[in-house]
Image: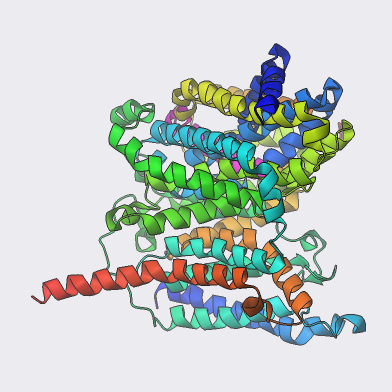
Amino acid sequence: MALDRWIALIFVAMCCVYGYAAFFTMDQLLPPFMQRNPVWPSTFPKILAVAGVICGMVVLLGLEKQGDDKEPSATDINYRRLQDYNTEQAIGLLILMVAYALALRPLGFVGSTILFLSAGGFILGERKFHIMIPVAALATFIIWYLVQEVLGIFLRPWPFFLA
Amino acid sequence: MLEGLMIGLQTAINPFNLGMVVFGCIIGTFIGMLPGLGPMSIIAIMIPIAITLGDPTAALILLAGVYYGAIFGGSTSSILLNAPGVAGTVATSFDGYPMARKGQAGKALTIAAVSSFMGGTIGAVLLMVFAPMLSSVALLFHSAEYFALMVVGLSAIAAFAGTGQVGKAVMMTLLGLMMATVGEGALAAMPRFTAGILDLQSGFSFITLAMAMFALPEAMFLVMNPARSAQGGSDEDKSGTINNMRFSRAEGRAIAPVIGRQSVQGFFIGVLPGAGATIASFLGYAVERNLATKEEQAEFGKGSIKGLAAPETANNAACTGSFVPLLTLGIPGSGTTAILLGALLALNVTPGPRLMVDEPQVFWAVIISMYIGNLVLLVLNLPLIPYIAKVLSIPRNYLIPFILFFTLMGAYIGQNNSTELLILVGFGVIATILRFADYPLAPLLIGFILGTMLEDNFSRSMQLYQGLGFILERPMTLGLLVLAAFLVVLPTYRAARARNRAKGVADGD
């Protein structure tokens, strides 16, 4: 089964869970004075859930007439050529972003951002540390200064033990 | 009116006020380029400065300059990085980013600047002429009409549905609408679909979702397939065309009617409180796609100049239009104008029907400063375009970490919550998989943006009319819904007809 149909299957399953929550759990919490209203907080989600299941089934069962398959160009993204792509680098960057999110509080904005920018360049194959680290540090300080000092949005610049 | 204009001109061309327009435009453009800081936040940040000026006219002129600058700055990150920082510039990235990828970043930015200028200027003329009259028309729009207008805005999804893609586009829209229902609902302050997670109480944030749907997958694709960033010929060719900001006379002729139509349409949508630049830009895109010829339609989404000019003109015209209810009725039509209203009240100016009579210098000076602001933006930005476009020639190993960093910052600045970053990465991965499976992501974002407004207005109409009766009882609602259906069905019908005709030719009919 093609990837788009797998996604349609997951979507239909998600709509069922969403619909279950809308049809069977939300209305129990409704205060009595609202029960006489023609529209409840669950009304719109119920409509969406039903429409979602119908639409997901149309894609899942391939009921729609497909267009002519064109030959994908070299710059198009095609999951069948996944092994030709730099998937490791992409996964490395995703892990780095998660690490950045987790490090922002304990390490502070300045430290974690310099590390993020340098490590990002490293993952992509940059080895000129003498350029990369100063560029990262300079950019970080400029952005921190602009955002916190000029615009007044607090960023918690330093690690927790210095704050 | 002429007397008012003269008063306005006199006030606006005072060197101090002129300086304020220029300062506002510069600040707005540069901060607006940072994803995550939209016009609303920038204006909020600038309010203390504006209030310390003490003069309401100068303050309003400064804030109007910041507003225009921020909208233009937002388009820059949409075009160059596919990172729309503001809902109103999402539609700009549909064709702006493909143009930048083709090596036409300079041209795309110029078209954006010229369209914004024209949209803003024509909008200002319309504001001057129609403001008093329109304020009463805007009040005729009730929730039923707003609901129908949102549905018309949703019809923009048809533009992303290629052959065999209608189901997928609708599916993505529904997913966006479902995501909009997460958090406290329209009717009661009752949390819905939060699974008990406190961070979801206020729902997903637009900026997180926009970054996850557009900027992050694109950055991932640039990493995975380096050929993607090298599109548009060799590096030498590219650096030659990337800075080239000129568009040909034929291209100018092609976008002129688009600009004309969208200035008017965008302005009138902007006048309606609550509709604003976002719907104007989506609707502008959808309408222009329907009006385009078959060959031009195929270009939409792949770097069409019409597809870029339409939303850019419409969102600027709508920004001008949103001043109509603010200045004439004292009703803020959008979050941004609500903040402006707050600033005005702090400066002891009460906008409303009496403003034109009691303080004509404020009213007219703002209108005149809109012309000047637009002109300053054009003069300021055109020479800067080659330098701004150069961002794309930064080596990949440096550019990509910075794109990712700005993507993360966009979500972080507004919320100061690192959970938001984890949500962004999670959605970014899902969006990348969806892109792999050829699902269009723009409909998801359109659904998400319009979802809350759609549900609010739908619920209010249902309550007022005790059911779905409002559709038949209000002719304007019915008319708008028919228009929406027409906008969705027409492209599919035209495509089917063209396919049948081609088949007929192939069969020798």
How far across and down, in percent of the image, does residue B21 sit? 67, 23
The extreme top residue here reads B15
Q: Compared with residue B495, is residue B471 higher up or lower down, i.e. above or below? A: below
How far across and down, in percent of the image, does residue B207 sit? 65, 49
Q: Would you say A118 lies left or right of B488 here? A: right
Of B86 and B438, nearer the camera is B86
**Residue under the point 75% across and 43% down:** B328
**Residue under the point 68% across and 69% down:** B144
Of B64 and B75, nearer the camera is B64
**Can you see residue A156?**
no
**Residue under the point 86% across and 35% down:** A161
Q: Where is the N terminus of chain B found, in terms of image quarters?
A: top right
Q: Would you say A140 lies left or right of B173 here? A: right
The extreme left residue here reads B508
Q: Quadrant of residue A34?
A: bottom right
* Dominant SS in magenta: helix
Q: Would you say B415 lies left or right of B468 here? A: right
Of A72 and B281, nearer the camera is B281
Q: Where is the C terminus of chain B found, in terms of image quarters?
A: bottom left
Residues in magenta, as a range: B390-410
How far across and down, in percent of the image, does residue B507 sit? 11, 77
Magenta highlight on residue B408: yes
**Can you see residue B391?**
yes
Magenta highlight on residue B445: no
How far across and down, in percent of the image, does residue B380 sit? 54, 21
Q: Compared with residue A137, is residue B478 higher up or lower down, i.e. above or below? A: below
**Residue under the point 47% across and 26% down:** B385
